[in-house]
Amino acid sequence: MYFKTKIKYLKQDESSGKVKKVNEEYMVQAQSFTEAESNITRMAMTMVDDFQVVGCSGVTMDACIFDENDSDYWFKAGVETVTFDESSEKEKKQVLNYYIQAPDVESAIKSLKEFQRDSISDWELVSISKTKVLEVYDYKTIAEQGAELLDDESEESEEE
């Protein structure tokens, strides 16, 4: 399960020198709201010193498609699938939500087509939009960052 989390912190503008409030959205994989808040806290600690977690909500996501080039943007795609229910002898439509990492909408659609290539059911892209999500952290990424944080903390304690 994934959760959309929001953090807020102060950031100094490099060109003007002014300090401004920044709100950022991240998705984290977790089993509960508590774990999601813990995971985004762990990840945010690697980016900024002083921040607040200001939001956490569950997300309906059927798949997360990562880009091997680590693109900057995330797109949400609604895909309608059509399957045949043999017991009722009727077609069944269902909308699935995919989050796709890509540099632009055309690349996101291409990644979705590649992902759906071996699908046994008919499908149609019914919506796609760019999200405000800056990064999606799955369990593997969170574990790797957690190990790095522990290594950093042990090195700091050894230096003291």
Image: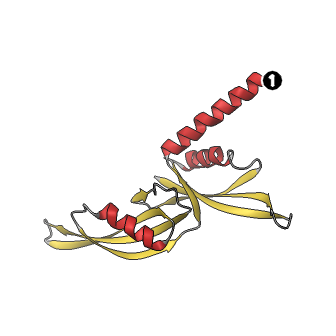
Which residue: 24% across, 60% down?
A: 118
The percent coordinates of residue 89 (x first, y second) are 13, 71
Q: Which residue is drawn at 73% across and 63% down?
A: 22
Q: Which residue is farthest right?
A: 17
On the picture, is 157 further left or further right than 6? Answer: right
In the image, is residue 54 above or below residue 34? below
Foreground: 48 or 81?
48
* Number of numbered callouts drawn: 1
Q: Which amino acid does label 1 sit on?
A: Glu
How crowded pointer 1 is (Cα within 10 Å; few <14, some 14-19, many 20+) is rated as few
* x, y percent for residue 108: 44, 68
Q: Which residue shows up at 66% across the image and 49% down it? A: 44
| Residue 83 left/right relative to 48 | left
Determine which quarter of the picture holds residue 45: top right
Q: Is residue 156 above or below residue 66?
A: above
Q: In this view, does 129 lie above or below 143?
A: below
The quarter of the image holding the C terminus is top right
Residue 83 coordinates in the image, percent (x, y) = 21, 68
Residue at position x 72%, y 53% in the image: 52
- The structure's colour scheme is secondary structure
Across and down, in percent, residue 96 comes to 36, 66
Nearer to the camera, 5 or 99:
99
94 displayed left or right of 14? left
Residue in the foreground of this view, choosing between 54 and 111: 111
Question: Which of the 4 quarters of the picture holds residue 116?
Answer: bottom left
Residue matched to label 1: 160
* Tag 1 secondary structure: loop
